[in-house]
Amino acid sequence: MIDKFNLIFVTFLNTGRIGFAPGTFASFFTCIVFLFLNNFIDVKIIFILTLIIFLYSIFAINKVIKHFNSDDPKEIVIDEFVGQMLTLLAIPIYENFYPTFDIYYCVYAFFLFRLFDIWKPFPVNYVDKNIKGAFGIMLDDVVAAIYVIIFMTITFFVLG
């Protein structure tokens, strides 16, 4: 029972089982979830929930990794959820430099996160190759999210 829950959890409600670009779909659905939650819940609470999801993901991935034929299966997309959510949680920072509608930040963050997650510039590629297991699966997306946050902050500082 708990393995079934963990499989659904790490595949982000089976989004990871989509045959084509599951990470991109997970990031897209994360943007939708964020836009919905941001209307009802304070960003600090969303951050705490994201942190809890990050920590539980490490446990859940360790429990279900045996069900996959890879050390970093494409079906596990909860890392994309956490990484994308972190980029969106920084929207209050961006708004300080360049106020606009949240949807614009979401679209920009979505494309940048997918770019950095696929491109894997240093140190994202280092984390991806050298840190193994559940923590490595999660951490490369967190580092990619940090890149996006820095890039977007600089972009909006220059525009603002």
Image (spheres, rainbow, N blue to C red):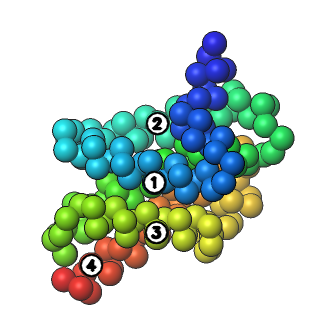
**Residue 125 in sight:** yes
Between label 3 and label 2, give the one nearer the viewer: 3
Label 3: how many residues lie within 10 Å, few (<14), some (14-19) or many (20+)? some
Lower sequence index among marks 4 and 1? 1
The residue positioned farthest toward the bottom in the image shown:
158
Residue 59 visible? The answer is no
Q: Which mark is residue 111?
A: 3
Residue at image point 48% right, 65% down: 113
| Mark 4 burial class by Cα count in 10 Å: few <14, some 14-19, many 20+ | some
Q: Residue placed at 37% from the left, 70% from the top?
A: 108
Query: Residue beneath label 2, please?
Result: 53
The amino acid on which the numbered mark 3 sits, given as a three-letter code, is: Phe
Q: Quadrant of residue 99?
A: bottom left
On the image, numbered disc 4 is attached to which residue?
Answer: 156
- Which one is closest to the eye, mark 2 or mark 1? 1
State which quarter of the image contains the N terminus: top right
- 98 vs 46, left or right, is left
Q: Residue furthest right?
A: 69
In terms of sequence position, does the residue under pointer 4 or pointer 2 come before the other?
2
Q: Residue 45: where, in percent of width, then height?
A: 26, 38
* Image marks 3 and 1: residues in contact by CB distance under 8 Å: no
Q: Which amino acid does label 2 sit on?
A: Ile
Kindly indicate whether the residue at mark 3 contacts the one at mark 4 (C-beta within 8 angstroms).
no
